[in-house]
Amino acid sequence: MNNLNNNHLNILDLPNEILFIIFQKLNTIDVFHSFVDVNPRFNRLVFDSIYIHDLNMTTIMDTTSLYDQTSLIDPKVLLRICEKFLPRIHNQIYKLTVEEYSINQILLASNYPQLYSLSFINFQEEILYQYLTDNLILRDLTKQITHLNIDIKETIKHDSKIGSKIFTLILSLCKKLIVLNFCHMFPTRNYSPSLFYLLWENCIPSTLIKLKINVSTLVDCLYLLNGPLVCLSTLIINVSSTFCPLEYINPTKKLPKLKYFSFTAPNYTRHYDDLILPLLRRMINLEELKLYLTVLRSGSTYIDGIQLYEQFLIYMTQLKKFTFNITTIVSFRTVRLKLQSNEDIQRSFIGRGYQQVASYIYIHPKRFLSDGECHIYSLPYGFEYFVNLNNSFQGGMFHKVRRLKMHDGIPFENKLFKLISQDFPFLEFLYISNDYPQKDNQHSSTLITFPYLKFLHLKWAHIDYAKLFLLKKNIHLSRLSNLSIEYKSLITITNNFTNDATQFNFDKLKSLDECQSFVRPKNFHQYFPLL
């Protein structure tokens, strides 16, 4: 404790207002633990209800490392927290965040009579299901919960039904549940259970009004809205894939209680006209709508402002806000139709109550893949992700975007990356898919900077893009902590790990996915000191 006291001597004289701000910024259990019993004044601050009402018992701060994260809490520290800290504050905790490796000790440490919000972070589905099934303390605790957040690790069992069992078990246990976030917490997670085949009788709390969820298919979304969750006023749903549902789903049943609907289907769908449009027409009292779609069409034209208005917006008489990013990919197998120009697309939004809309047309160089693509999106841009950006991108400001996926059949040149670094200033995740070498790889004297980029995916990128992004002389990546790349690309750009290690953006890497196993060279640690 002497060392701890010495570490804090420089802030002992700070006013309480400043210390409050420090504690709020460093709201982790490790920090609170370190300040306990330093002196009476610190104790008063640490045990103030302003801080401990929302207690985060995890040390996982970086969502990019959540794929296979183990507990970072020292077992001795955790033991002291559970024995000395939690019993003193248990009746002041309103929100609690726990992870798999510490939940048992935390549940046994005390009861939490005021708790209404509970978050499970980084759980294996089998472990969480076991706790919900067998742990009497947790089952009793769920009776008082009104807000619940679930984060589950991805499983290699693609047909696993445990996730859907967890979902229905939660709904049957949490009778006071108002808000549920089910596996829709982190952008790097792709865990999406299938729910449509489950029996729903007597398991849905009538109090549930807001659901945020990842699901496997569009069928799951249709089933949720067709019966068990008709009471929802807010639904935020991400759909991994789409296919045709069973015939007995009623496509005309109205959803009068739904006020806010956010629907994201970033993967290609062919069922916009026959499934998604009928679903939207059922939402007669919707006040806010968010759509993110990539639509494949054969023998039809691009989705434009006229189609959006006449096909479903005209039925939403209460709609106040419409945010969208819709990509249409068109191909003609038989009869060819004339596709709209970008000017036609822009004109289609005039006079129908839309806010500002951006658009651009892309004609693929290999026409057998498609006859054309049309991107339309509302401004200001309202999503944290942007998928399938290509060389036709027109620029703009995208302050909300954290994740960007780029794909094209012609090379990405440096000027495009310069534009992206300026237009996506808070970008954290970047995926590049392009097999074609750069034609103009002469680097500008102005250094390209991505100040927040922490995840870079280059598995499907030509070696030129690895050279561009991973050499410090070309691009500055001060926070790059996760890299996915072909091992042969690493060998090439480092000259078989003989070039100067300080030339590369490797010094902050905590995770390296190199697509194959290999024997690390003797000087590997010089290149990747944190691995």
Image (tube, rainbow, N blue to C red):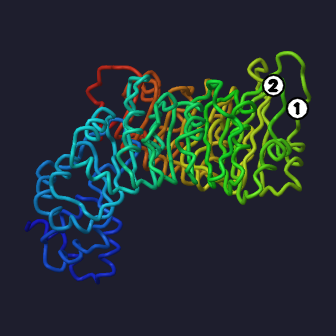
Q: Residue furthest right?
A: 338
Residue 141 higher or lower than 271, as above or below: below
Which image quadrant for residue 90? bottom left
Residue 152 higher or lower than 51, as above or below: above
> In terms of sequence position, does the residue under pointer 2 or pointer 1 come before the other?
1
Q: Is residue 449 left or right of residue 423?
A: left
Q: Residue furthest left?
A: 2
Which residue is depicted at the point 24% across and 62% down? Answer: 31
Report crowding for label 1: few under 14, some 14 to 19, many 20 or more residues within 10 A (C-alpha): some
Q: Inspect this view and state whether residue 436 appears.
A: no
Q: Using the image as rendered, state which of residue 247 and residue 8 is in the foreground.
A: 247
The image's mark for residue 239 is none
Q: Residue furthest top?
A: 334
The residue indicated by pointer 2 is 371
Q: Inspect this view and state whether residue 185 appears.
A: yes
Q: Are marks 2 and 1 in contact (CB under 8 Å)?
A: yes
Label 1: element kind: loop
Residue kind at label 1, given as amino acid type:
Leu
Which residue is depicted at the point 69% across and 26% down? Answer: 409
Residue 188 higher or lower than 489, as above or below: below
Q: Using the image as rendered, state which of residue 221 and residue 81 is in the foreground.
A: 221
Residue 531 higher or lower than 496, as above or below: below
Label 2: element kind: loop
Q: Position of residue 202 (x, y in %)?
A: 43, 41
Q: Position of residue 329 (x, y in %)?
A: 75, 30
Q: Is residue 104 left or right of residue 172?
A: left
Which image quadrant for residue 155? top left
The residue indicated by pointer 1 is 339
Q: Position of residue 184 (x, y in %)?
A: 47, 44
Residue kind at label 2, given as amino acid type:
Asp
Report crowding for label 2: few under 14, some 14 to 19, many 20 or more residues within 10 A (C-alpha): some
- Placement of the N terminus among the 4 image quadrants: bottom left
